[in-house]
Amino acid sequence: MEARKVAVVTGAASGIGRGLARIADERGMQVVIADVDEAGLARLAADLGGRPLAVRTDVSDTVSVDALAERVFAEFGRTDILFNNAGLLSGGLSWKIPTDRWRRILDVNVMGVVNGVASFVPRMIETNLACRIVNTASIGGFVSSPLIAPYTASKFAVVALTEALAIELQLENSKVAVSVLAPGAVRSEIYAETRGARSEDSVDRSISAMRDFTEQTGMDPDDFARWAFAGIDDGQFWLIMQPEIYGAAIADRTRRALEGINPLPAHYGSAMADPDTSKEGR
Ligand SMILES: NC(=O)c1ccc[n+]([C@@H]2O[C@H](COP(=O)([O-])OP(=O)(O)OC[C@H]3O[C@@H](n4cnc5c(N)ncnc54)[C@H](O)[C@@H]3O)[C@@H](O)[C@H]2O)c1
């Protein structure tokens, strides 16, 4: 009998990560949940009947992620899917977001993925099993999102490094496959830090509109996770949510770049659109 498959999910205590962990558990996988939020991990582990292994992990910390990998391979001897999913977001004008906050977001969103890759790929290769790393980027990794610049910059980096990784693993004839997961709006706590924004401030109003859109119209995280697993089952690299909606925005951004059309607020969603600037600018 084949050993039970193992899924490792970072940022598992909330939102998309919790959905991925729940659906991996529903599919009969041994789930390892990792997050800085220990109380959230304990709640999820209890909800899932104590089946997941919960490991407090700070993905920005190389030592912490390596300890996670060490533990997973010591206990289960394999990782079939690693979800590098933990992420942070801050809102505001680029020049007003403190540089410490920029650094923290890049450390978690980009270096968190780099740390996961560095600690898990060698161990995955060693098992010689077909397995996969799924890096959570965002539609914001293809279409720049003003007022959340550290976030969107980090997600462009995740898309680029994941594509590079996919090619490198093929060049090495590795059995480790890779996917980039690009959610659009999924209900979660990703905008939590932006709550309490002042409604009289137009920047805050735009950020609040993005938050309300995600929290009120976002997809259910379990449904999102089921969709993601279906794409993984198909061996998909590009896991881009609702391409019929978000694909148009990605294609339009590429077209504007190639045609030399300068960015205008109207290109970036209703939260920022100003009717006076809705003409295309060259
Ligand atoms: N929700 C959306 O609409 C959306 C859209 C696009 C991309 N994403 C991405 O999905 C991923 C999951 O976010 P979410 O929306 O579920 O948000 P969330 O805030 O609900 O969950 C993020 C989780 O990451 C954890 N985390 C934060 N810093 C960490 C660290 N240093 N180490 C380990 N864990 C840490 C948090 O404690 C939290 O449990 C993120 O990468 C996010 O950028 C979300």
Image (cartoon, grey):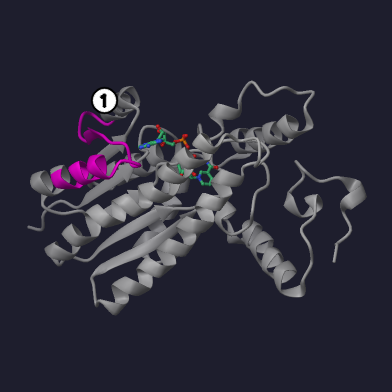
Q: Which residues are magenta?
A: 48-70
Residue at the spot 23% in from the left edge and 29% down from the top edge: 49
Up the image or down, 59 lies above or below 183; here it is above
Residue at the spot 75% in from the left edge and 41% down from the top edge: 271
**Residue 246 painted magenta:** no
Up the image or down, 248 lies above or below 205; here it is below
Percent across and percent down for residue 223 are: 47, 45
Amino acid type for the residue under numbered disc 1: Ala
Quadrant of the rendered image containing residue 248: bottom right
Percent across and percent down for residue 102 are: 52, 40
Q: Is residue 80 visible?
A: no
Q: Which residue sits furthest right?
A: 276
Q: Is residue 270 left or right of residue 225?
A: right
Label 1: which residue? 46
Mark 1 CB near ligand 1 (8 Å cut): no
> In which of the image's four quarters is ligand 1 placed?
top left
Residue at the spot 55% in from the left edge and 45% down from the top edge: 151
Percent across and percent down for residue 233 are: 35, 62
- Image quarter in which the C terminus is found: bottom right
